[in-house]
Image (tube, helix red, strand yellow):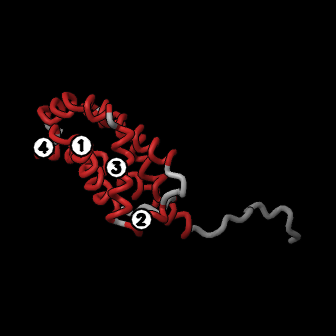
Amino acid sequence: MHPAAIRRIQASRDGLLAGVEPLSIAFYDILFTTYPELRKLFPADMARQREHLASAITLVARNVERLGMLAEPLRGLGARHIAYGATNDMYPIVRDTLLEAMATVSGSAWNEQAHRDWREALDEVIALMIDGARAAQARLDAAALEPASHDTDDTNYPH
């Protein structure tokens, strides 16, 4: 990320994080209104899911200058999302919905520069998550192609 973008995100993150709960509520409201077909991927009770999102946003916002240090956890998060039914084409939807929710809760503090800066940060997060999802999917695909393992010790068989 460009150092100036990092500085701008750092300067604005406290205001954004002060409203992280309303942000997570706004995110899911916008997501399910705009993409109702995605609702089935989430639990009926969204309280815990909103908490997870709020924690993830907080983690990224507080560590935007060192997203590389979050690479392995973000790859792991992407890998886990396969089990939830997430596909690579959903990541831009989530990014754009999150940006819209940020704009909604930030009000007049949000502008095009904030949008560009956060999009750049979220694009880095998405790239790491997709990388993790692809690696996990490749492992699953490879495991599905392997023949069932058999005991190669034939000492129990009469000759």
Q: In which quarter of the image is the C terminus?
A: bottom right
Give SS at disc 3: helix
Residue with the mark numbered 4 = 111
Give SS at disc 1: helix
Amino acid at pointer 1: Ala
What is the crowding at mark 1: few (fewer than 14 residues within 10 Å), some, or many (at least 20)?
many
The Cα atoms of the two marked residues, 1 and 2, are separated by 24 Å
Amino acid at pointer 2: Leu
Q: Give the camera-side residue of 115 and 146.
A: 115
Foreground disc of the pair 1, 4: 4
Residue with the mark numbered 2 = 38
Q: Where is residue 67 in the image (x, y as percent from the top left)?
A: 30, 36
Q: Give the camera-side residue of 69 and 62.
A: 62
- First-in-chain label (1 vs 2): 2
What is the crowding at mark 3: few (fewer than 14 residues within 10 Å), some, or many (at least 20)?
some
Foreground disc of the pair 2, 3: 3
Q: Which residue is drawn at 51% across and 62% down?
A: 140
Residue with the mark numbered 1 = 121
Amino acid at pointer 4: Asn
Residue with the mark numbered 3 = 26
- First-in-chain label (3 vs 1): 3
Foreground disc of the pair 3, 4: 3
Q: Give the camera-side residue of 96 and 15.
A: 15
Q: In this view, does 3 lie above or below 135?
A: above
Q: Give the camera-side residue of 8 and 120.
A: 8
Q: Position of residue 64 (x, y in %)?
A: 27, 34
Q: In which quarter of the image is the N terminus?
A: top left
Q: Residue at x 45, y 53 (%)?
A: 79
Foreground disc of the pair 1, 2: 2
